[in-house]
C-alpha cells in the first residue's frame, strides 16, 4: 500500500477552496455529484488494488522494463496515471456542462463562459485536455523535454478508448481558452497544478519524475497502462461502488475504497504451481489417464521443452490427428504460466462449434490445475463467441455467478443487454463474475475459450483496443487448428503474434498439417524477425520453439505407435457411380462418410442416396441447421460414430452413410469404415482422413466389416479425364483452383499407383511430405499440367495480394520504437469491434452474413417454437402481444440460423432485412424483451417453407435449410 502519510486517502487535505469546487461526475436524475479530487483519489486507489491483487505478474514486468527501479516504480506509475487521468476535467471546456456546479466554481474565482458560449468545446474532450495539461506540467514544473512527456501523458489522452491524433492536438492548441479562461488563466493554471502536485506527492512519484524523464517507455507498456487506467476509471465511476456527494460526502475515504473493493470482488489471477514431477505424472494428474496408459511422445517432449526454455516464448506443435495436441498445449500452458507470471489462459479455435467442444474440456481441466481457494475466492471463465449464452455448460456458470451489484457499467455504457453481445462470464470455484460482463471487458476473464476472431480483434484498430491487449498480455495463448486460416486472417494473426511477442506472452500453436512456409512466418512474426528457412522442413511430428531473442529451433519428435494406411482411389463425380460403389462397399454393412465441399452438393447427394439406400440409412450434417438442431446433430454423430467406449451398442449394424460438409473436418471425434471426399486442399483432405479408422475396433480392425478392414478413401468432385483435372465449380469457388490443382498433383502418384507405396498413404509418415510439397514452390504434377498450374498460381498470388491489402485497411501497425507515444495509434479505425456478423467480417475475408431466429407460423397465424425440439422446448405457443417469458425467449434465440451466401449479396441482404423487419412482432422489440429485441424472426409454415427476398426456403430437421430461387 502507499505510505500512510502520503496516501491518496488524504488527497483532499490542504487543497485550496477553488480546487475543491472542481467537479468530475454528475447524476442528472439525483443531482448527485463528485468532486474531481474525490474521483482522482478513488481512481488511484482502485489502480493500486488492481495492480496488487488482480493484474498478473506478466503485465507488471512489461511496464517495469523501462523504469530505473523496476516493478516498484512501475506500481507507482500505474497508480499516478490512474489518479491524474481526469485532470482534463479541470478546464472550462468540461466544467461548463452543468450550470449549478459551474456556478460554484465561478464563485471560487474559476470563471468560464456558459455552455452555449463555448461552441468549440468538443475540440477539447477532457481526455485530450488532460494529456496536454500533464505534458505542460511535466515540462514547466519538472523540466522534462516536450518529446519525453508524450509517452507517459498519452495514457490520459487515450483513456476513453482512442489516443488522440496530431490533428486533434493541433485543434486544442489553436483554442487555449478551452483549457483556461483568459481573464483568470493564472488561477485555472494554479488549480490544475495544485491538483497534479498533490497527486504526485500522494502517489509517491515526485522523486521519480527526474529519472522517468530519461526513460523510454515501450509502446506495449503504454498500451497496458492505458488499459489499466480504463479499468480503474470504469470501476471508480460506478456510483453503486463509489457513491456520489452529498450522500457520501462525509464517508471515510479508506472505508469507501474497502467497501467498493469488497463489493466488486474481482477474481485474483491464476498463480499455478505445477508439481515437480515427470511429464507422465503431470498428464496423469491433469487429464485422468486410464491405468497403464502412456502419453504420446509429442506430449512428453512438449513438456520437457517448456521446462527447458530459457524463458517462455512461442511453441508450435505439429502432430497427427488424435495425438493429444490439445492436452499437450494445456500442460505446456500451465508450465509457461508458472514461469512467466501469466494470470490465465486463452484457447482460440476456428469456429463456434470447435469452441463449444473445447469449453467442457477446459472446465474438466481447471479444477485439477487451480490451487485450493478459500470459500470466497473464485476464478473467472469465459466462453467467447456470439452465442455463448446458449451453451448449457456456460449458462450454468453464469447462473452460479450472479450477484447483487447494481449499476454495473457494461463497458462504460448504459446499452441494453443483447443475447449475442458476449456479455457472459464465469469463474472457478467457477462462476460468472458480474463486473466482467461486456464485449470489451469480457476477455479480461482469467480463462477463456473462444473463436479465433477474439484474438484477431487484437490486431484491428478499434475503440478500447487497449483493454483487449491488457486481457491477452496477461495470459498464455493457445491457437488451435492454425492451418485453418486464409491469407486475410493470417495477415491479422501475424500482426497479433508480433504484439504478443512484444508483450512476452507465451503462445502455443497447434496444427496437424502446417506448411513449412507458414510455420516460418508464425515464428518470425512472434520473434519480430524475417522468416528464415528450417533445416529440416520434412520432419514430423515436430515442435518448433522460439525463445525471446533467440533463433527458432525445430525439433523432430518420434511418432506414437498409432498409424493408419489409407488406400486412395479416384471416383467419377456422377452420383450413379457413387451409389454403385457404396452399394458394393457396404454390402456387408459398415459406416461411410461422404464429405462434400458445398451444402448444395451435400443435399443433392443425400437425396440421391436415400433413393438407393432408404431414408433411415442416410444422415446429413452441415452448418445450415438452427443452433439446437446442429448441436443435436453433433451429439448424435458422437453417440453413434464416436470412440468404441462411447458408441458401443449404438453404432449402426447395417449400412449407414453420413453425408457431411466441412463440419466433419474439425473437433468431432468420429470414426468411419470408409471415406469418400470431394477433392480439396491437401491439408484438409488429411484432416478428413483423420475420421477414417480413427480408433481400433477389434484386433486388426476385426470388428469392422470384412471389406472395410483396410482403410480406403475415394476422391471425387473432379473430372479426372481432363488435362489438368477440373474440380467442380463449387470447390473452385471455395478453395480456388491453385490449391486444388496442387493437391491433385501431389496425390497423383498415389491415385495412379506409381508412388513407392503404391496407392497407400501412410499416416502419419506421409502427412508432412504431402503438405510441404503441396504448399511448396517446386513444380509438382504431370508436365501437361504445368501451364495451367502456372496460370492458377498467378491468379492465386493476385488474390492473396488483394487479401493482404484489404486486411491492411484497418489493421493495427507494427510495434513502434520505445519512447514513441501512441499518438494516432488507432487513427482511421473501425470504431467498436464486435462479435457480430459485421464485426467478424472485419477480421475474416467474408461478406456480411444474415442470421435469423426460426419459429413456426401455423395456419391460424399463431407463432410456435419448432415442434421437434427436444427437452420439452418444442411446440410451445409464443405470445405476440407481449414478450415471451425468458424460458421461451431463450428457446427462440437457440434457433438461430445463418442464411447462406445468396443472402450476402448486398441487394438481396437489404431486401431480406426489409422484408423481415416488416414481419416483426412489435411486442418483441420492447426494452423488456432482452433476448429478442433487435433480432430478425423467420417464420416457417407447417411444412417448413417460406419465401424471402426472391428465394424459396425449405427447412427440415433432417436436412436443414434448402434454398432455391423462386419461380
Image (spheres, rainbow, N blue to C red):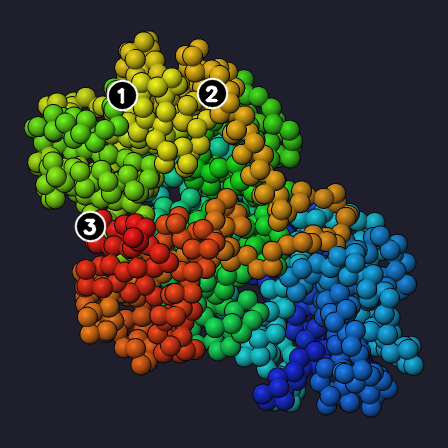
Q: Residue 11: give its label.
A: none
The residue at which mark 1 appears reads as 570
- Mark before the other along the chain sequence, 1 or 3: 1
Q: Are marks 1 and 2 in contact (CB under 8 Å)?
A: no
Local packing at callout 1 (Cα closer than 10 Å; few below 14, some 14-19, many 20+) is: many
Relative to residue 454, is residue 259 depicted above or below?
below
* Residue found 35% across the figure and 48% down from its top: 353
Q: Residue 958: give its label.
A: 3
Local packing at callout 3 (Cα closer than 10 Å; few below 14, some 14-19, many 20+) is: some
Distance in Å between CA atoms under marks 1 and 3: 29 Å
**Residue 215 pos. (x, y %):** 79, 49
- Mark before the other along the chain sequence, 3 or 2: 2
The residue at which mark 2 appears reads as 789
Q: Quadrant of residue 418?
A: bottom left
- Residue nearest the observer in this picture, 834 or 643: 834
Question: Does the rendering let one see residue 497?
Answer: no
Amino acid at each position: 500500500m502507499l505510505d500512510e502519510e502520503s496516501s491518496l486517502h488524504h488527497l483532499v487535505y490542504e487543497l485550496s477552496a477553488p480546487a475543491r469546487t472542481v467537479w468530475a461526475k454528475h447524476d442528472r436524475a439525483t443531482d448527485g455529484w463528485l468532486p474531481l479530487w474525490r474521483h482522482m483519489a478513488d481512481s488511484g486507489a482502485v489502480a493500486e488494488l488492481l495492480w496488487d491483487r488482480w493484474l498478473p505478474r506478466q503485465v507488471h514486468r512489461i511496464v517495469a522494463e523501462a523504469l530505473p527501479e523496476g516493478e516498484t516504480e512501475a506500481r507507482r506509475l500505474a497508480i499516478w496515471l490512474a489518479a491524474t487521468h481526469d485532470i482534463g476535467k479541470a478546464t472550462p471546456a468540461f466544467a461548463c456542462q452543468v450550470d449549478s456546479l459551474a456556478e460554484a466554481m465561478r464563485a471560487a474565482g474559476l470563471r468560464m463562459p456558459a455552455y452555449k458560449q463555448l461552441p468549440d468545446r468538443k475540440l477539447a474532450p477532457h481526455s485530450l485536455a488532460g494529456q496536454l495539461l500533464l505534458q505542460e506540467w511535466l515540462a514547466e514544473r519538472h523540466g522534462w523535454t516536450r518529446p519525453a512527456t508524450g509517452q507517459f501523458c498519452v495514457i490520459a489522452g487515450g483513456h476513453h478508448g482512442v489516443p488522440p491524433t496530431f490533428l486533434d492536438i493541433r485543434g486544442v492548441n489553436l483554442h487555449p481558452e478551452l483549457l483556461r479562461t483568459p481573464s483568470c488563466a493564472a488561477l485555472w493554471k494554479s488549480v490544475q497544478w495544485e491538483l497534479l502536485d498533490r497527486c504526485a506527492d500522494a502517489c509517491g512519484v515526485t522523486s521519480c519524475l527526474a529519472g522517468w524523464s530519461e526513460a523510454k517507455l515501450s509502446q506495449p507498456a503504454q498500451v497496458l497502462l492505458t488499459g489499466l487506467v480504463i479499468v480503474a476509471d470504469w470501476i471508480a465511476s460506478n456510483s453503486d461502488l463509489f457513491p456520489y456527494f452529498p450522500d457520501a460526502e462525509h464517508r471515510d475515504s479508506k472505508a469507501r475504497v474497502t467497501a467498493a473493493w469488497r463489493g466488486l470482488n474481482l477474481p485474483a489471477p491464476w498463480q499455478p504451481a505445477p508439481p515437480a514431477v515427470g511429464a507422465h505424472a503431470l498428464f496423469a494428474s491433469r487429464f485422468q489417464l486410464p491405468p497403464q496408459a502412456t502419453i504420446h511422445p509429442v506430449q512428453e517432449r512438449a513438456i520437457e521443452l517448456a521446462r527447458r526454455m530459457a524463458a517462455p516464448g512461442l511453441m508450435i506443435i505439429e502432430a497427427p490427428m488424435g495425438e493429444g495436441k490439445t492436452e499437450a498445449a494445456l500442460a505446456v500452458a500451465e508450465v509457461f504460466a508458472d514461469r512467466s507470471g501469466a494470470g490465465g489462459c486463452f484457447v482460440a479455435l476456428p469456429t463456434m462449434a470447435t469452441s463449444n467442444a473445447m469449453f467442457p474440456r477446459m472446465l474438466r481441466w481447471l479444477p485439477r490445475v487451480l490451487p485450493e481457494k478459500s470459500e470466497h475466492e473464485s476464478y473467472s471463465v469465459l466462453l467467447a463467441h456470439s452465442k455463448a449464452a446458449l451453451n448449457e455448460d456456460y449458462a450454468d456458470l453464469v447462473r452460479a455467478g450472479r450477484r447483487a451489484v447494481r449499476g454495473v457499467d457494461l463497458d462504460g455504457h448504459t446499452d441494453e443487454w443483447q443475447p449475442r453481445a458476449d456479455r457472459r462470464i464465469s469463474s472457478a470455484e467457477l462462476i460468472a463474475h458480474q463486473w466482467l460482463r461486456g464485449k470489451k471487458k469480457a476477455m479480461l476473464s482469467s480463462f477463456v475459450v473462444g473463436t479465433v476472431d477474439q484474438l484477431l480483434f487484437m490486431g484491428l484498430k478499434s475503440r478500447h483496443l487497449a483493454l483487449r491487449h491488457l486481457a491477452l498480455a496477461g495470459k498464455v495463448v493457445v491457437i488451435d487448428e492454425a492451418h485453418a486460416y486464409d491469407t486475410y486472417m493470417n495477415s491479422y494473426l501475424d500482426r497479433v503474434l508480433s504484439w504478443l511477442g512484444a508483450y512476452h506472452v507465451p503462445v502455443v500453436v497447434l496444427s496437424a498439417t502446417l506448411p513449412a512456409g507458414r510455420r516460418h512466418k508464425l515464428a518470425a512474426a512472434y520473434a519480430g524477425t524475417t522468416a528464415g528457412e528450417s533445416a529440416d522442413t520434412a520432419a514430423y511430428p515436430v515442435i518448433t520453439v522460439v525463445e525471446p531473442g533467440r533463433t527458432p529451433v525445430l525439433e523432430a519428435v518420434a511418432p506414437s505407435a498409432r498409424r493408419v494406411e489409407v488406400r486412395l482411389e479416384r471416383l467419377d463425380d456422377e452420383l450413379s457411380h457413387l451409389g454403385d460403389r457404396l452399394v458394393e462397399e457396404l454390402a456387408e454393412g459398415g459406416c461411410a462418410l461422404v464429405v462434400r465441399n458445398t451444402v448444395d452438393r451435400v443435399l443433392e447427394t443425400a437425396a440421391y442416396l436415400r433413393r438407393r439406400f432408404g431414408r433411415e440409412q442416410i444422415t446429413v450434417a452441415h452448418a445450415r441447421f438452427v443452433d439446437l438442431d446442429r448441436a443435436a446433430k453433433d451429439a448424435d454423430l458422437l453417440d453413434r460414430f464416436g470412440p468404441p467406449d462411447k458408441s458401443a451398442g449404438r453404432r449402426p449394424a447395417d449400412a449407414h452413410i453420413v453425408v457431411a460438409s466441412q463440419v466433419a473436418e474439425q473437433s468431432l471425434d468420429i470414426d468411419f469404415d470408409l471415406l469418400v471426399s470431394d477433392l480439396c486442399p491437401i491439408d484438409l483432405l488429411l484432416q478428413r482422413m483423420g475420421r477414417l479408422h480413427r480408433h481400433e475396433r477389434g484386433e486388426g480392425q476385426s470388428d469392422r466389416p470384412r471389406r472395410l478392414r483396410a482403410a480406403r478413401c475415394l476422391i471425387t468432385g473432379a473430372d479426372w479425364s481432363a488435362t489438368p483435372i477440373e474440380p467442380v465449380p463449387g470447390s473452385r469457388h471455395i478453395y480456388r483452383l491453385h490449391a486444388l490443382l496442387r493437391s491433385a498433383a501431389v496425390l497423383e502418384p498415389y491415385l495412379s499407383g506409381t508412388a513407392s507405396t503404391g496407392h497407400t498413404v501412410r499416416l502419419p509418415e506421409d502427412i508432412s511430405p504431402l503438405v510441404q510439397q503441396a504448399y511448396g514452390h517446386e513444380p509438382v504434377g504431370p508436365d501437361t499440367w504445368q501451364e495451367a498450374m502456372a496460370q492458377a498460381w498467378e491468379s492465386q498470388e493476385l488474390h492473396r495480394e488483394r487479401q493482404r491489402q484489404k486486411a491492411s485497411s484497418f489493421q493495427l501497425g507494427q510495434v513502434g520504437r520505445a519512447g514513441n507515444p501512441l499518438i494516432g495509434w488507432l487513427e482511421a479505425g473501425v470504431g467498436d469491434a464486435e462479435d457480430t456478423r459485421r464485426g467478424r467480417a472485419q477480421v475474416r475475408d467474408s461478406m456480411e452474413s444474415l442470421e435469423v431466429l426460426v419459429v413456426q407460423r401455423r395456419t391460424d397465424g399463431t407463432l410456435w417454437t419448432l415442434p421437434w425440439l427436444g427437452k420439452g422446448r418444442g411446440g410451445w405457443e409464443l405470445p405476440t402481444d407481449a414478450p415471451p417469458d425468458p424460458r421461451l425467449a431463450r428457446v427462440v434465440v437457440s434457433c438461430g440460423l445463418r442464411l447462406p451466401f445468396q443472402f450476402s449479396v448486398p441487394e438481396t441482404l437489404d431486401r431480406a432485412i426489409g422484408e423481415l423487419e416488416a414481419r416483426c412482432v412489435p411486442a418483441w422489440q420492447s426494452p423488456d424483451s432482452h433476448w429478442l429485441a433487435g433480432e430478425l424472426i423467420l417464420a416457417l409454415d407447417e411444412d417448413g417453407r417460406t419465401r424471402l427476398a426472391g428465394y424459396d426456403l425449405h427447412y427440415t430437421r433432417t436436412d436443414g435449410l434448402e434454398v432455391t430461387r423462386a419461380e
